[in-house]
Image: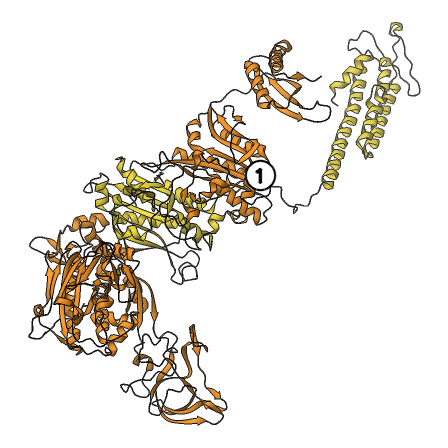
Chain colours: A yellow, B orange
Amino acid sequence: MSVNHIREPLLEVGWYRDNSSQSVYADWDFLIMINISTKIIIKRKEEIAMMKEELEKIREEAIEKISSSDALEKLNEIRVFYLGKKGKLKDVMKGMKDVAPEERPKVGELVNKTQKAIEEKLEETKKNLEKIALEKKLESEVIDVTLPAKKSKIGHRHPNTIALEEVERIFVGMGYEVVDGPEIEYDYYNFEALNIPDNHPAKDEQDTFYITDKILLRTQTSSVQVHEMEKGKLPIRMISPGRVFRSDEVDATHSPSFHQIEGLVIDKNVTFADLKGTLAQFARELFGEDTKVKFRPHHFPFTEPSAEVDVTCFKCHGKGCRMCKGSGWIEILGCGMVHPHVLEMSGIDPNEYKGFAFGVGLERIALLKYEIDDMRLLYENDIRFLKQF
Amino acid sequence: MNTPLSWIKAYVPDLDCTAREYTDAMTLTGTKVENFVNLDEDLEKIIVGKIEKIERHPDADKLIVCQVNIGSEVTQIVTGANNVKEGDLVPVVLDGGKVATDHDGKKVAGGTKIKKGKLRGVESNGMMCSIFELGSDTNMYPEAAEDGIYLFDDSVKPGDDAIAALGLRDSVFEYEITSNRVDCYSVIGIAREAAATFRKEFVPPVVKVNGNNENVNDYIKVEIEDKDLCKRYTARVVKNVKIGPSPWWMQRRLSASGIRPINNLVDITNYVMEEFGQPMHAYDLDLIEDKKIVVKRANDGEKYTTLDGQERNLDSNILMINDGKKPVGIAGIMGGENSMITDNVKDVLFEAACFDGTNIRLSSKRLGLRTDASAKFEKGLDPNNAILAMNRACQLIEELGVGEVVGGVVDIYDEEREPVRLKFEPEKINSLLGTDIDSDEMIKYFKKIDLLFDDATNEVVVPTFRQDLLCLADLAEEVARFYGYDKIPTSMPSSSEVTGKLSYEMLIDNIAKDVAEFSGFSQAMSYSFESPKVFDKLLLDKDDVLRNAIKISNPLGEDFSIMRTVSLNGILTSLATNYNRRNKEAKLYEMSNVYIPKALPLTELPDERMTFTLGMYGDGDFFTMKGVVEEFFEKVGMKDIVSYDSKSGKTFLHPGRQANIIYDGDVVGYIGELHPLVGINYDIKTRVYIAVIDMEMIYSKTSFDRKYVGIAKYPAVSRDISMVAKKEILVGEIEEVIRKRGGKLLEGYKLFDVYEGEQIEKGFKSVAYSITFRASDRTLSDEEVNKVMDKILNGLKDLGIELRG
């Protein structure tokens, strides 16, 4: 309670600041009220001294009581007893009118001081008690923090998608656009435009699912290369992830449906060195900073020169282990400079533009990265499997 | 293709490397070695011993005790073998040595250690070995005993390394030869690459035949009727053939290559096929009628018996070798029974031809007959190689004394294949590779692989065996291979006006995935093709358009034969898997295409529709699923009211618990509880909820335009109403009234109770809403709110709804 509040009870007893009227006489055993109109002014220094003493006594007593309080309710009782409307301080105040007007401010100050001291003590003790009470409460609220968490059971991305998104992140960061193409495709886009004419042995090797003579399930996402090149918007920097289909029976390492990510860059001054740099960067991002890459000559009908790329085994870091069959290397992708004939067929002048392309098997990456030992797990969708990703 | 290192070394005499070094180096120049086997793997301390004395074992009838001279000493060995006699030279594994087989005679990784010991009380210091214990078999060593100790001839002496004597100190490489490198399906081709790789001299065999004074044309005439399928046919005749075993070195090279030695004649043709990559065939000349060979297509429906005794069905696209009267062999694939060489053969007709690769491949596929010969022909051989191979075979006939080669060659070769000449542009090669290789260096690489450089014309002359080199990029690869792919620098493409990004549709798909996952669904993946039985499992009507599915003409089986038109089967099958594996609950989603044909059979590409499919059992209900759908819509900025039409008519869903999801007037998907009969079809015996969203309908309805609307300054007024409605009335209808009649002041409404049962008349339900009103510019007065509420209540009355007191 602030000092301001004290004024109100003072007003109630008719204490006014003009000098005109009141004086107070107070005795501690009884109170003598003297009518103001009698204008009897009593000046007794001893009495004032007594009042002072009395106030001092109240203060000491109150503070003593407050200090020994151990509950907030008791504090309230004390407050009422000393500071309330009918409290002890009020009683003292009533004697004010017997005090000579020139003495009144002194006495008033004294009363205020006493009140303030009690207030302060009350406040201090209250805070203290509250603090103790809070501490007690907190103590009683101790929990076993090792009890199980309450989770909102968030679902999980398929490992293929996790791997794909990692690959996408890397290439998007390098300025590649992610594009999509049809899964059911014309023979032309899947083979012919990629330098695989009719009767080319590669057509046989891939064991294509056909719908009609001319329409098939794409065997490679390379088909999207052709669509992108045909759009005629150069330069190109794209990757195209998606499903591809090959006539392989289902087993631990084969699936008739799997995913590839095709990459294509077409620009005026692209070189094989750029292809090497790009894929080395990709491998480091995907498999770790210390990953090394090895380019081996290979053959694909739609690239020349062509290469297969091995990365240092990320399990044994090149020392040789079961995963890399002791070689220290793991084959992860095929790539090469886009064959000039392929550029030509899609309406790009090979004398002006060059390009490189690469194809990554998504499942291969997912299986390797997450050490999944059976491809069938990817298509069973057992919650206990999916939960791990 | 398997080749032993020793055979490669025969043509690259300076080659000095380990099998591992060879493997790595060859792989880096493009001749990928898949793996290699050391033939002496697991064979240790095995030397030649001479049996000097044999005695019976004192205590065992089936054992004998041999005193064996192993060069340095005579040692005692006890054996149970019964094919040895005194004086025999045998392989002996000494104490501490190793053989390739276990005690049961099976080849075992790591081999088996041999220790000296006592056999029935008699000391034995080693073991005499059979060919199997030496890691091989009687196919590869026809002279070896099937059930006994291997016996050497007298070319070896006691103490010699028996492994070397058997030709097993060798490594065999298995290659992955790419389809463009037909020339590398031969020892010569690989040896040429090896010489270039290791920068050693390449010394191919010098082919030279003498021939006698006769003329082959007096023995045989050749006619090619179908020249489109036979570019070249060469023939020679060998007289007075003496069939016998081929020499040891030839047998060893063949056996190391995985080819079983048979007799000198057969072995020579096989040897030349391996060496030059050119299949050859030998006919018994006496069985060739009219002394004439005619190369022509067979007739449809004709039958012919090949030399393996099988009758084959021919057709008019199969090329046949005929004599004057009848077919004598299927060209390039297999000879006939009726012209087969027997041990009694006298005169032989050799054939080395060049048949059309594609035709051979397709014929061999139709016949279901793939042979070593057809496997080579189908790659498309160099016609110039045929004559080399022919002469090489005849040279070997002469050198090995197998017979008398008749002078001259029959060679029908109308259009000679010429070398390709390519302009040499080193700067372009460097700019393609990103290198700075000197042009002289490039020419050096070319020469190593027999590409000649014509200074006068500045052209690279490509020999005909390199059919894969047709343009500058091809030459660039040759340069890169021998410069070393690893030495080419690495750089990044120079920046270009491109931005990395995902397509808008992919972003929407990803949001759908996120919402599904935050709602507890995990991503599933299933095949795009499935069984047509799926339609019956889903109880689709006989004439349901979804049954119009695209059929794969050559599927892996009926279960994978149609492209899905409805996405549910994958999710339901996966849920069933989880259910049957006793996973208590499962929430799965899939983001994948369905394939809707525009017409059947397909004349153009079908409509591939990205479909977001959710399915769950265990925890949650219809409204859980509905929540996921609406959360997704909100996330992609579809903020209008989603409505649900329960007359969605899906046969596979619970008739009373299904709805089409309607947004902006379009059906964008459906939601519902699985029909219990469909559940039974999938073997799931619990309630399953699904939602299917046609993403192609969604993309155009999404929006990420966001505009801030000020946070309300004036207080809202809420009114709760409780009403009794007929059971059939949908809360959607009630809400529509609230929305329509609520006007501008309506801020929102919330259903807080639906109740049927006691205290409510049968056929009715109690529904309670809390409706909130607010104006943006003032505090609403009671009168204003009452006015709107009256409008709403009147509207509800029109639906026959009464307020509850």
Decide which of B49, B54 is in the foreground and name it. Answer: B54
Q: Residue at x 63, y 9 (%)?
A: B783
Residue furthest to the right in view is A29
Q: Is residue B519 above or below residue B214?
A: above
- Quarter in which the N terminus of chain A is drawn: top right
Left or right of B731: which side holds B670? left
Q: Nearer the viewer, residue A102 or B51?
A: B51
- Label 1 sits on what residue type? Pro
Left or right of residue A48, residue A338 in this image: left
In the rendered image, residue B7, in percent from the top left (x then y), is placed at 24, 71
User: In which chain is the residue bearing label 1?
Assistant: B
Image-quadrant location for residue B240 = bottom left
Q: Is residue B232 above or below residue B769?
A: below
Q: Residue B584: x, y in percent? A: 60, 45
Describe residue A152's horizontal placement relative to residue B247 as left or right.
right
Secondary structure under tag 1 reads: helix
Residue indicated by mark 1: B676
Rendered image quadrant of residue A251: bottom left
Decide which of B492, A345 is in the foreground and name it. A345
**Residue positioned most to the top:** A37
Q: Is residue B364 above or below residue B246?
A: above
Please provide percent x and percent y for residue B280. 20, 66
